[in-house]
Image (spheres, rainbow, N blue to C red):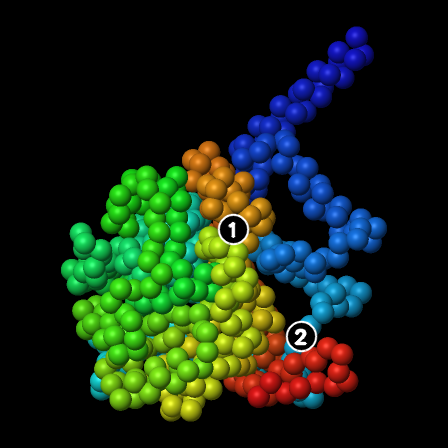
Amino acid sequence: MVVFVLALLLLLVVSALYVHDVRQSQHTILRNFPVVGHVRYFAETWGEYMRQYHYLPDWAERPFNRLERSWVYRSAKGVSNLVSFGSEAIPTFVFRNAPFPILDEEKGHYPGKRIGITEGPGACVTPFMARSFFNISGMSYGALSSAAVTALSHGAARAGVWMGTGEGGLAPYHLAGGADIMMQIGTAKYGVRDAHGNLSDERLRELAAHPQVRCFEIKLAQGAKPGKGGILPAAKVTPEIALIRGIPAGQDSISPNRHHDIANVRELGDFVARVRAVTGRPVGVKFCLGGADFLEEWFADVLARPQGCPDYVHVDGGEGGTGAAPAALAEYVGLPITQALPMVVDARREHGLEERIRIVAAGKLLTPDKVAWALCMGADFVVSARGFMFSLGCIQALKCGSGFCPTGVTASDPRLIRGLDPTDKAVRVARYAARVVEEVEIIAHSCGVADPSGFRAHHVTQVERGVSGFRNME
């Protein structure tokens, strides 16, 4: 009898827990995996205390360690990120704090920067005044679920940041929240192609008619797979996604490894000029850098033919990685952002293009220290993809290409997508963006500058391992 009563009580408790889990909207794992999902949260909570007995330290996980992910999770949830008992980080660089930091009453905020010019060769009809230095990098609908893209759009609008479409075209979910949009044109020209796969001026005009579409971005390559186009498995190419991209449904969506009509810097300039003339919007170029020779040739051509000058360049480090990619490309091709960004900044300065071309930096820049580093190096803006995926609840399950992401972020299974509540996650997206901005400003004030636009290379110093002392990063 006692056993029966206990079993009945256990059944009632489990049933109540099940109902609670499927009805709540804050935790996607619990909605998708009621009851058993609590095991993850229990293990995560107690892991902090049990790690002293474990051989694997917090900073050993890949591609993002627990310290980085936990910082994003806490920021997105709006809980404290204060630490106790000293630093756990093993820095490769440190910021040079000023002896007399900025007082509270002296603090300022990032003033924003304009992308695009209104007069002279290469002018556009509608420049974009970008308000935030930290924004959402391009992630395609299809690679991300509809719920995830919707949450990002609403969160971006709340935070006052822009979001990129990725190369998969402009989806209704990108527009849902009213955020500023950077429309990307990939090598397959999804969303802006005609029936033969060529660039369509008509489609460009249709997209430019959306007031939210602030800029167009020509993607030469991304850090996840330099020299190879995007890959979306057939299982993810639904009729809706096929319609947005202008491709057949139910077939692998594989982009060419480069634009067929861009084979050199001259053709790149012509392409930039055409898109800007048709749309009236600023036009940027995204690439993963392989060497300085390309920059020298490109910027020299820009000076000779300013009508083809991009309004911004988006340099993606070789450690970029939201897209599915062969391991050899993901791990061993493309300069890391720590090398690529300074090279781009130097080339821009040497050619006198500092006031003409803005620089956007990407490549695992998802915490305030790395964002501030990029601004010190000369970037005008920083974008993150995986940081915002973590803010949506991504647990780094590494199931992105399968369609069965347990958190619904990259899922194509409707049951798993339903677990991600866009309303709740939009708030977390906005909180994460705001926390990054807030803590970058804290670093700036500590360095003695009123706002992050005052960062310079001398504010950061590289830590040389195995060598006594530091090295200035100027």
Outermost left residue: 202
Q: Residue 157, can we see it? A: no
Q: Which x, y percent locates residue 466?
A: 76, 79
Q: Which x, y percent locates residue 77?
A: 59, 53
> Mark 1: which secondary structure?
loop
Q: Quadrant of the N terminus?
A: top right
Q: Residue 260, can we see it? A: yes
> Mark 2: which secondary structure?
loop
Residue for point 33% across, 58% down: 256
For badge 1, the amino acid type reads Leu
Residue for point 71% across, 41% down: 42
Q: Is residue 159 left or right of residue 126?
A: right
For badge 2, the amino acid type reads Thr
- Given residues 362 and 79, the one toward you in this image is 362
The image quarter containing residue 69 is bottom right
Q: Mark 2 sits on what residue? A: 92
Outermost top residue: 1
Report the Cα–Cα distance between label 1 and label 2.
28 Å
Q: Which x, y percent locates residue 118?
A: 24, 81
Q: Mark 1 sits on what residue? A: 392
Q: Is residue 23 left or right of residue 54?
A: left
